[in-house]
Image (cartoon, helix red, strand yellow):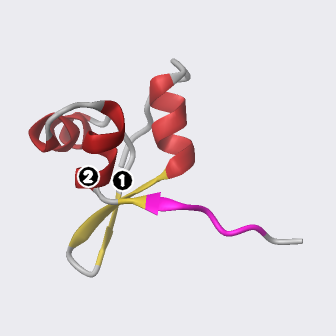
Amino acid sequence: MTTLSKFYTPRQVASLLGLSQLTIYKWIDEGKLKAYKVNQRWMIEQKDVENLVYGKGGSQK
Protein backbone atom coordinates (compact mmCIF):
# COMPACT_ATOMS: atom_id res chain seq x y z
CA MET A 1 0.00 0.00 0.00
CA THR A 2 1.33 3.42 -0.94
CA THR A 3 0.94 6.31 1.47
CA LEU A 4 1.07 9.93 0.40
CA SER A 5 3.42 12.24 2.21
CA LYS A 6 2.09 15.40 3.77
CA PHE A 7 3.70 18.65 2.65
CA TYR A 8 3.73 22.07 4.29
CA THR A 9 4.48 25.58 3.11
CA PRO A 10 7.20 27.54 4.93
CA ARG A 11 4.42 29.61 6.53
CA GLN A 12 2.78 26.47 7.93
CA VAL A 13 6.09 25.13 9.24
CA ALA A 14 6.84 28.48 10.88
CA SER A 15 3.44 28.42 12.56
CA LEU A 16 3.85 24.81 13.72
CA LEU A 17 7.27 25.51 15.23
CA GLY A 18 6.52 28.99 16.58
CA LEU A 19 9.19 30.59 14.39
CA SER A 20 9.27 33.29 11.74
CA GLN A 21 9.01 32.51 8.04
CA LEU A 22 12.39 34.16 7.59
CA THR A 23 13.95 31.55 9.87
CA ILE A 24 12.41 28.74 7.82
CA TYR A 25 13.66 30.25 4.54
CA LYS A 26 17.13 30.70 6.11
CA TRP A 27 17.18 27.04 7.13
CA ILE A 28 16.18 26.04 3.59
CA ASP A 29 18.98 28.17 2.12
CA GLU A 30 21.50 26.71 4.59
CA GLY A 31 20.41 23.14 3.82
CA LYS A 32 19.29 22.62 7.42
CA LEU A 33 15.73 21.95 6.23
CA LYS A 34 15.05 20.08 3.00
CA ALA A 35 12.46 21.69 0.71
CA TYR A 36 11.19 21.23 -2.81
CA LYS A 37 10.26 23.96 -5.28
CA VAL A 38 6.81 23.15 -6.70
CA ASN A 39 5.19 25.64 -9.09
CA GLN A 40 7.41 28.43 -7.75
CA ARG A 41 6.52 27.63 -4.12
CA TRP A 42 8.66 25.93 -1.52
CA MET A 43 7.10 22.78 -0.05
CA ILE A 44 8.49 20.91 2.93
CA GLU A 45 7.75 17.27 3.60
CA GLN A 46 6.43 16.37 7.05
CA LYS A 47 9.21 13.82 7.62
CA ASP A 48 11.83 16.52 7.04
CA VAL A 49 10.21 18.77 9.66
CA GLU A 50 10.15 15.83 12.08
CA ASN A 51 13.81 15.04 11.34
CA LEU A 52 14.74 18.64 12.12
CA VAL A 53 12.69 18.78 15.33
CA TYR A 54 13.83 15.40 16.65
CA GLY A 55 17.49 15.99 15.87
CA LYS A 56 18.02 13.63 12.98
CA GLY A 57 19.70 16.40 10.99
CA GLY A 58 18.83 18.16 7.80
CA SER A 59 19.65 17.19 4.28
CA GLN A 60 20.58 19.16 1.21
CA LYS A 61 17.89 20.66 -0.99
The picture quadrant where one finds residue 9 is: bottom left
Secondary structure of the residue carrying tag 2 is helix
Q: Nearer the viewer, mark 1 or mark 2?
A: 2
Query: Is 37 contained in the magenta span?
Result: no
Residue, x 26% and y 52% (percent of image)? 10
Mark-to-mark CA distance, 1 and 2: 9 Å
Asked whether 33 or 11 is in front, the reply is 11
Q: Residue furthest right?
A: 1
Residue, x 57% and y 44% (percent of image)? 47
Where is mark 1, residue-wise? 35
Residue 57 in view here: no
The picture quadrant where one finds residue 13 is: top left
Q: Residues within 10 Å of mark 1 (few under 14, many from 20)?
A: many
**In this rendering, is residue 15 above or below 40?**
above
- For badge 1, the amino acid type reads Ala
Q: What span is in magenta?
A: 3-7
Residue, x 75% and y 67% (percent of image)? 3
Please identify the quadrant where the N terminus is shown: bottom right
The picture quadrant where one finds residue 28 is: top left
Asked whether the beta carbons under mark 1 and mark 2 sit within 8 Å of each other, the answer is: yes
Secondary structure of the residue carrying tag 1 is loop
- For badge 2, the amino acid type reads Pro
Q: What percent of the width, then of the height, locates residue 32?
A: 33, 31
